Amino acid sequence: MSKEELKIVSDSKISKKIKKGDALFREGEKLDGVFCVRDGVSKLSKLSGNGKDQIVRLASKGEVMGQRAVIAEESTNLSAIAVSDMKVCFIPKEVISNTLDRNPNFAVEVLRHMAHDLREADDVIVNMSQKTVKQRMAEAFLYLKKNYGEDTEGYLTLVLSREDYSNVVGTATESCIRIISEFKKKGLIKTSGKKIGVADERKLLDLIEGF
Amino acid sequence: MSKEELKIVSDSKISKKIKKGDALFREGEKLDGVFCVRDGVSKLSKLSGNGKDQIVRLASKGEVMGQRAVIAEESTNLSAIAVSDMKVCFIPKEVISNTLDRNPNFAVEVLRHMAHDLREADDVIVNMSQKTVKQRMAEAFLYLKKNYGEDTEGYLTLVLSREDYSNVVGTATESCIRIISEFKKKGLIKTSGKKIGVADERKLLDLIEGF
DNA sequence: CGACATTTTGAATTCCATCAAGAAACGTGG
DNA sequence: CCACGTTTCTTGATGGAATTCAAAATGTCG
């Protein structure tokens, strides 16, 4: 991307602060631009027929939300809700489509990014359909540790509610809670209030592999 | 896409015939190009930890396979296996990447296509995690009817094995068979050998909605 | 026909969602 | 700071859904 173009995109950014629990957008809305996360984490979820949310992915610093809808010129299929306080910047869709048309490299860059998202989505499909709830819970904890890290005491940096966990894993909140307490009893994880920490990574991995 | 470029792509195509059951490629392989389906149908599947295949999507006439891997310059995450006899054409990756670099419109076109795939993948994730096996079976039949049509007697044009059905839906083959016979008894579908036909679209829809 | 894969049914078991109800945490206004 | 209503978390009990293992029936192909 050339310097002038980088400047255009950069100038057209609008910064926003979003409070935990507030929505950046909701499924079905038309977006006039994309959001880029500068700080904090957002969940991207979709309402299912039975009234439950399914969290499809999480977006944190440096990640972009809404590009699928803007590119396809459709309304969003997902809602974006802040899981923690956030700072985001907004880039109007005209800027996106102009840059796309003018700059093949930018397009290819976006393409790569979407190819990556698609691969992850394929993996999630397989996990959802072939793994047990326990295995998916174990994966979720390892994923959160890997992507968001842990504090000095070994607890996951990103703190989610039990309901959010269940919406990531696609299960009932009670099942999720039961599995957390089972994992704790077996020493796979540790808890402190809402915080959860990975205690035995190896055993979690074994569980995922089916031992 | 300009005429010259169209010609380049067209000239570089290589036609292949693939027999039912044969693989176009297998997960983990590196691809040196993409496949475009001219005739027949292929399943795109991924092996899960427990040894079962999960069919992520089906590709038929006009659809392209392998573009994700080629664009991301990774090995494929999916296997492509012919569900019926097929004719496909192969386009080398150099041709793809050259065209991508030169032609912003082509890139945007591919981008739109991938945005569409991503949306569908999101929907599948929600279906897999929130719907029952029965509901997913019902959806599968309606999907197959809508996308591949039915013969003069009302049976689905695309004939899959029971195992393939179960791999689409993400369930055990026995469960899948039991549901088929239940649906038949209730008059939702009809069968004749391996062939399956939609008998009562409305009732299938009701079942999906949870009645 | 015989060998092999696919389809079908049966029964036992495990997994998970749901309903109900109690305990702990949280915020808010007095 | 406490009393309160509200939300979130936790545990128990139960029924239904789906997997698994086993075995029989049917189909397919050399």
Image: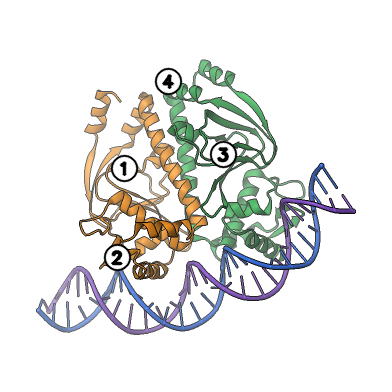
Chain colours: A orange, B green, C purple, D blue
- Callout 3 and callout 1 share a chain: no
Amino acid carrying mark 3 in the image: Arg
In the rendered image, residue B100, in percent from the top left (x then y), is placed at 44, 25
Q: Which residue matches tag 2?
A: A190
| Amino acid found under the numbered disc labelled 2 | Lys
Q: Residue at x 53, y 40 (%)?
A: B27
Check contact, mark 3 vs mark 4: CB within 8 A. Answer: no
Could you tell me which quadrant the C terminus of chain B lies in? Answer: bottom right
- Which chain is disc 2 placed on? A
Query: Picture coordinates of residue B63 (x, y %)?
Result: 57, 35
Q: Chain of mark 1?
A: A
Q: Label 4 neighbourhood size at 10 Å, few (<14), some (14-19), many (20+)?
A: some
Q: Badge 3: few (under 14), some or many (20 or more) residues near its Cα, within 10 Å?
A: some
**Which numbered disc, 3 or 1, marks the residue closer to the eye?**
3
Residue assigned mark 4: B102
Q: Which residue is mark 1?
A: A63
Q: Position of residue B3 (x, y in %)?
A: 53, 17
CA distance separating discs 2 and 1: 29 Å
Q: What amino acid type should be assigned to the residue bearing mark 1?
A: Glu
Label 3: which residue? B26
